[in-house]
Every structure is written in structure tokens, then in C-alpha cells.
Amino acid sequence: MLTDKAGKGVQNDAPRPGQSAQNPLRTGGNLLQLVSPEGERISHPEFDLWIKDIGDEQLGSLFEDMTVIRRIDTEATALQRQGELALWPPLLGQEAAQIGSSRSLRDDDFVFPSYRESGVAYIRGAHVSEIAQVWRGNALYAWDPQRINMATPQIIIGSQSLHATGYAMGVQLDGASTAVLAYFGDGATSEGDVSEAMVFAASFQAPVVFFCQNNHWAISEPVRVQSHVQLADRPTGFGIPSLRVDGNDVLAVMAATRWALDRARSGGGPTFIEAVTYRMGPHTTADDPTRYRDPNELEDWAAKDPILRLRRLLDVKGLLTEDLEGRVKAKADAVAAELRNSCVNMPDPQPLDVFNHVYSTPNSWIERQKDHYSRYLNSFNQPVEEGAL
Amino acid sequence: MSKLTFARAINAGLRKSLENDPKVVLIGEDIGSLGGVFRVTDGLQKDFGKHRVIDSPLAESGIIGTAVGLAYRGYRPVCEIQFDGFIYPAFDQIVSQVAKMHYRTQGRVKMPITIRVPFGGGIGSPEHHSESPEAYFTHTSGLRVVAVSNPQDAYTMIQQAIASDDPVLYFEPKRRYHDKGDVDESIDLSNAMPLDKAAVVNAGSDVTLVAYGPLVKTAKDAAQAAADEGISVEVIDLRSLAPVDYPVVEASVRKTGRLVITHEAGQSGGLGAEIAASITERCFNYLESAPVRITGFDVPYPYSKLEMHHLPNLDRILDGVDRTLGRPNSLSGLEG
Ligand SMILES: Cc1ncc(C[n+]2csc(CCOP(=O)(O)OP(=O)(O)O)c2C)c(N)n1
């Protein structure tokens, strides 16, 4: 329970958008849930408004997107096991968090992800081959950031929270009504950059939404090693309102993200969303969670599976038809086949490509090294003289 | 032509860049109403507003990290790091983000960020206020690193740095901020010496002496003193530390056969080592003696009462010149 100025109790979840700094900030509180794990729609006085346009058809398409990205994940994991990808960071269990948030974005909004947001990239319009090439080792760049308004995967933990804030400051300078969304994990909240990003965002009231996917683990370290308080309680000290949402409930994620993006676009400043979810797979394909994780924990969370939950909702509403299931399966099959094909047929980069694009202007040091290395490579094509060693 | 101090020259260059390009924004600590602790940004916030000359929170990683985002959005941020020793909290953003974004995105995202750093010693400061961190950055591909040595270059090169589509670390020799010099403010940037070119600032034939930033003046003084003894020293102001303009250094060493490099930074793994190795590779057969480095010691920057021992001065440089010439010097007899 928060208390307003008059001392009257206000409910955590009462509608209070665009608060001024004088009023208590909306913070964390009860987990926002719009669909129960059993698939029942839970009505909510404020947040129902933010998803009132989500009808039967949209529910079906959310189901499709979540199923497709799970399929991308399964296929990519298999490709890694077969040696076609060097590494893969699975998103299994985080489908609602990724789809609910990314489907809330407008085209002109800009996203700064970590390495795990393959589902977000898919929604933004990255081709599956672009998603695969980073993990295949064919390129560092993935997709064209300007084409899909999404930065390339970020491996330095939390770094992108500052980039998002700076971009949002640029949006303010432009006088535009674009919002910026930064993704990071629970572990990242321990990094200084995330705190610095919140300082800058609050000071300049930058239109940025910090979207933290609390999947409970940072490789082998549980979230309690990162924080003594709920993550959603942290931004309050920076003067940033926050929401704690059930990250396995796609409608709750969507409502919260739309609320935050709207605040950003309309000059309300930054927001922090903690999406409480669970990484059901390993951290990456190089990780072995059985070394550090209690199998019962996984079982508990499997019961809260985000796709299962949406299926139940669809079922309750009588929408889980053979037709829908068939269409979704066909789409997932097609995307998976596309991923596999484009991955195994991807041409290898050329040796001298290693020197390209370090600078946008010529650099004498690199040009010399490139010249020397190309001579070296060419020396293999020279005929060996008779009698030479 | 006007006579300006170093600090005013940079200020004039910043002003010109702000005027010419609405995408240029300045960001840093105390750069607004105070005009920076060295007053380099004096008056700019008053004339261009708080949105173009931004007083940032006290967070160096934040300054550089938000500049990355601003560059992503199409801006050309000019970041001020208040003192050399305070750049380390921003090191990750500089080397992992600013330097690599162009490569990472295969040229799709440019990082036209200028990072201004007052560097070097000689002003009697406390700890963390006199460092020479340039080698950390010259070692990082993707960054251009320059150090200015006179007001004219300071004026021109800050504008070139800002206009560069690549990120530039712009090192300002803080002990020279109050030195005055002629500045041609009407200089046409397209005719000016390119940012990555070295300049021969004193012609000579016996020894090549390479310096940059605050030590260029000392090197020129040393050449003058050597001339009194009949030794002709060619002084090269590197200007660009990454990339180093090797053809200019090479041509000089082919002529003189001898090389002395001087910098305030410690010796090991420093720029002098890089230059000595590269020149040895390129002109081994022309060298009459091994290249010599006259640098700060491999110690943390000392307390100011001792800094005059740490910093290369005219006499230590001349001692190095003597070494390359085989004249009697402080190390005479050591190798024998
Ligand atoms: C600065 C930095 N330190 C360490 C790592 C190694 N690392 C990669 S992912 C990771 C865990 C991150 O956990 P979290 O932020 O919770 O995100 P999640 O992987 O759970 O999505 C670590 C320690 C890194 N990439 N960057």
C-alpha cells in the first residue's frame, strides 16, 4: 500500500500515470497479472484499458508469434548441437516477455537489446538468417539497426541501457514522440551502467523504458545474489516509476509496456518494468544448469509456461481450434525450415573481410596490415620453383 | 590572425562546430555555466543553450554511453572528461562500444564522437590529475587518437575531430592551456593539414626527435639547445597518435639515422615502444644506433614535488640525443 499526500491509502495498482516528482512514485508492488496460470482472464481496473483492442484474432496472432519464436529457439539449439551454430542463448520460457513487449512497440520506436532477444528481433523484422549469422560466427552485425530500429546484440552486460538513454535524449532534442526500449536481465541490474542509465534518464526525463527480464538466474547466480530488494523497487530511488509484471502473462506484459511507452512518448519520462519470468533452458548452449539449479524449481515454473497459459486462455474462450493450431504449426515449421536452410547455406566470409569497417575513413596502419596479409595469402597461389625448398 | 591561448583556441573551434552543425552537442561535467574546470567551454552554454551544451551527472561511463546512443540517433557528441585520471570509469564504453560499433555493424552505425581529455602533468596537481593514458587508446582499433601541441592545431583539429565520422580521443596538454599563439580562425578545414598527419616542426639532419602534446615545446627547446652545440635535431610533432604517420617519421630517420622518442607516459608498452619497433622494422638498414626513449618512469604519477623528475625535460632529452650519437652521456660505459 502506498500513501498519497493526504495520507489516504491508495492501491498500488490504481491508475496514476504521469505523476510528478512530488507524488509517491508508482513502484513494484503486487505482480500485475491479467491471465492466471490456469488461463483465466483476471480483470484489472487500470490495465484492462491498455489491451482492450486485443480481440480473438490478436490473441491468435500472439499465440502464433510465441510459438514461432519457441520454434526458432528449438531449431537453433538443434543447429548448435549439430555444429552449425557456435553458440546459442535460448529464450525458452521468456516468450511472453519478449512478444508482449516487442508487440507493444511502434515502428519508429527504437530497441536496444542484450544477446537473448532473438524473439524481439524476429518481431522487429530481422530475417532469421540475420539472427543466426551472429551465433554462427559469420558476422558481428546481425541485422541492419536502422532498417528495423533495433540495435545489434549487446554482450557487455547492461551497456545498452546507457545507449538507450542517450538515444532517448536525442529523441528529446529532435522533439520527436519516439520511445526507446532497453532490454536487460536481472544480473545486469548490478552493473554500474544500469544505475548510471537510470540517473541520466531521470535527470533528463528521457523517453526510455527499461525492460528487465528477471529470469531468476544470471548464468549460475540466482537473483538474490544481485539484489536484496525486489528489482522493481530499485528505480524508485532514482525517481523512476516501476511496474512488476508477470512476465509469463503476455497480456500483462503488453499492458505494462504500452503504458510505459505511452508515458515516454507523451513526455512522462522513463519507466522501469520488471518482468518476472524464468529461463527454462540453459544460459547458453555452453551452460549446464543441472550443476546449480534444483529440478523442482524448473518443474514449478514449467507449470507457469507462458505458451501453455495462452493456450489455456484460448481454450477457455473456445478459440483453440484445429484451424488455428494447424496454421500456427505450419508457420512455425516454415520459419524453422527457413532458419535451417539459410544457416547451413550461409556463405563463409572472405579472409580479407576481417579488415573491413574498423574505421569509416582509411587508416594507414590497417591498410598496411591488409596489404601484407593479402600478399601472404597470394603467396600460396604462386607456382613453387623447381628445386626451391 | 588572432593571438589566442590554447584554451580559447579550443573554445573558438568548439563554437564554430556548434554553429556549423546543429547535430553537434557538448556533454560533460561542469561544462555549462562554469565553462569547464579549465574554462574551455566558457560561454558556450549561454550562447547555444542547455540542450546543446549539457551539464551531465557525475558519471563517466554515463557520459560516454549516452554519447553512443546520441550518435546512434545521428548526433555528433563532444564529451569532456574533466581530467585524464577520470577516464577509467568510461574505459569500457570507449573500448567496447565507441571503438567497435562501426566494425560490429559493418559500417551501418557510425560513432562520430569526440572525447576531449586534458592530459599530462606539470601543474602541481594531486593524484589522478596528471596522467597520460593515451597508450590504452592507441592500442584499441576503431579509435583515432590525437594530441595537440599549439593553439592553431588545437583550433583546427578540434573541428576536424568533430567532423570525423570515426571516434576521436582528443588529448589537450593541460599545462599549455595558457600558452598563447597565432590562430588563423578563417582557415579552410578542407585545406588544413589532415588530422592523421605528422608535422616536421624543426628541420634537422643529425637526429630525429619525435614528440607530441605538451612535450613538443620541450623538444623544440631541446633542438635549439642542441643547435648551440652544433647538433642538428629534426623535431616531429606527431599530432596523430593513432594512426602514427610513419611515412613522415620514416623519411626523417632515413635522413638522420637516429631516433629519439619522448613522452610523459611511462615507458613500458607505451607509444615510444611502438614507434621504436615500427621504425626499426621499416628502416633497420638506415639506423646508426638503437632508438632511444625518454619518457616518464614506470611508476604511478608521483606527488607534485617530484613531478619534475618524472617528466622528461630538456636535459633528459638532450642526454638521449647524446646516446644516439655515441657522445658522452649519463649511461656511457654501461654496455661496455
Ligand atoms: C560486463 C560483462 N560481465 C560478464 C559477462 C559474462 N556474462 C554473460 S551473460 C551473464 C549473465 C547475465 O545475466 P542477466 O543479466 O540476468 O541476463 P540473462 O542472461 O539471465 O538474460 C554473464 C555474467 C558479460 N557478458 N559482460
Image (spheres, coloured by chain):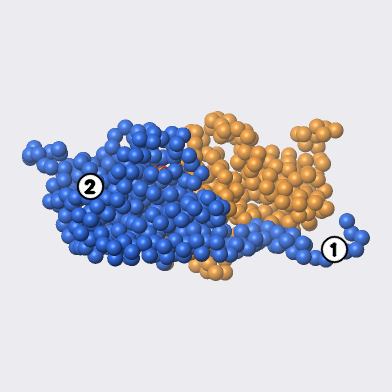
Q: Residue at x 41, y 35 (%)?
A: A293
Mark 2 on the same chain as mark 1:
yes
Residue mark closest to the camera, 2 vs 1? 2
Q: Residue at x 54, y 59 (%)?
A: A139
Image location of residue A145, percent across then percent down: 43, 62
What residue does disc 1 label?
Answer: A384
Pointer 1 chain: A
What residue does disc 2 label?
Answer: A38
Front residue of B247 and B32: B247
Chain letter, colour blue: A
Which mark is on residue A59?
none
Image location of residue A7, percent across then percent down: 8, 37
Q: Residue at x 49, y 46 (%)?
A: A285
Drawn colour of chain B? orange
Front residue of A347 and A198: A347
Q: Residue at x 68, y 41 (%)?
A: B294
Which amino acid, mark 1? Answer: Val
Alpha carbons under labels 2 and 1: distance apart: 74 Å
Image location of residue A113, percent across then percent down: 40, 53
